[in-house]
Image (spheres, helix red, strand yellow):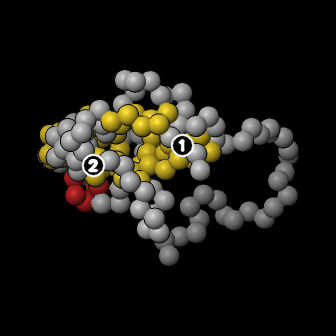
Amino acid sequence: MPEIKIKYFTEEIDKLEYIDGKSDWIDLRASETITMKAGEFKLIPLGIAMELPKGYEAHVVPRSSTFKNYGILQANSCGIIDCTYCGDEDMWRMPAYATRDVTIQKNDRICQFRIMENQPKITFNQVESLGNVSRGGFGSTGKQ
């Protein structure tokens, strides 16, 4: 099991924990109270920095309840933190856009992450045809 060094910027948020059997995503918390007005963008501090193993990256996304509870959207859809973002001041943050006025309290769980191996090196081979049956185009499977 890879070991990950973690630095906490505050003792006022709960430590990260892996919930066995329930999810392979780990919740991240706001490390300070943030107030946002509708239409405002902020980088929400998450209070941690990590040294990921070489060849790994972290994928950071909102929790399933984040929009319902706070009305915020992650501005970059999915944050990718690579193993070189590991300095003592490299605090993880969530880029958030508010759709309504909201206050996020310190220690609120607002996003989650998982560690993934980097994509293997690949090569592209240009062809005239892929030789497969077309499915009808992007979005062709309908609503049901």
Name the kind of residue labelled 2 in the image: Asp
Residue position marked by numbered label 2 in the rendering = 14
Name the kind of residue labelled 1 in the image: Glu
Residue 123, placed above or below residue 139: above
Q: Secondary structure at mark 2?
A: loop
- Front-most of 5 and 119? 5
Q: Which mark is residue 140?
A: none
N-term mark: 1 or 2: 1
Query: Could you say where residue 71 lies in the image, as x and y percent from the top left?
Result: 23, 52
Q: Secondary structure at mark 1?
A: loop
- Residue, x 25% and y 35% (percent of image)? 10
Q: Which mark is residue 3?
A: 1
Query: Could you say where residue 65 lies in the image, as x and y percent from the top left?
Result: 30, 60
Snapshot quadrant of residue 33:
top left
Q: What is the distance, in whole Å, between disc 1 and disc 2 at their CAs?
A: 19 Å
Residue 58, placed above or below residue 84: below
Residue 141, placed above or below residue 35: below
Report the residue that reaches farthest toward the bottom: 144
- Front-most of 141 and 106? 106
Q: Are marks 1 and 2 in contact (CB under 8 Å)?
A: no
Snapshot quadrant of residue 2:
top right
Query: Could you say where residue 116 lies in the image, as x and y percent from the top left?
Result: 57, 47
- Residue, x 43% and y 68% (percent of image)? 22
Q: Residues within 10 Å of mark 1 (few under 14, many from 20)?
A: few
Query: Could you say where residue 103 lies in the image, as x and y percent from the top left?
Result: 14, 46
The answer, for residue 56, to whether it is visible in the render is yes
Residue 132, placed above or below residue 56: below
Q: Residues within 10 Å of mark 2 (few under 14, many from 20)?
A: some
> Viewed as shown, does residue 92 lie left or right of 106?
right
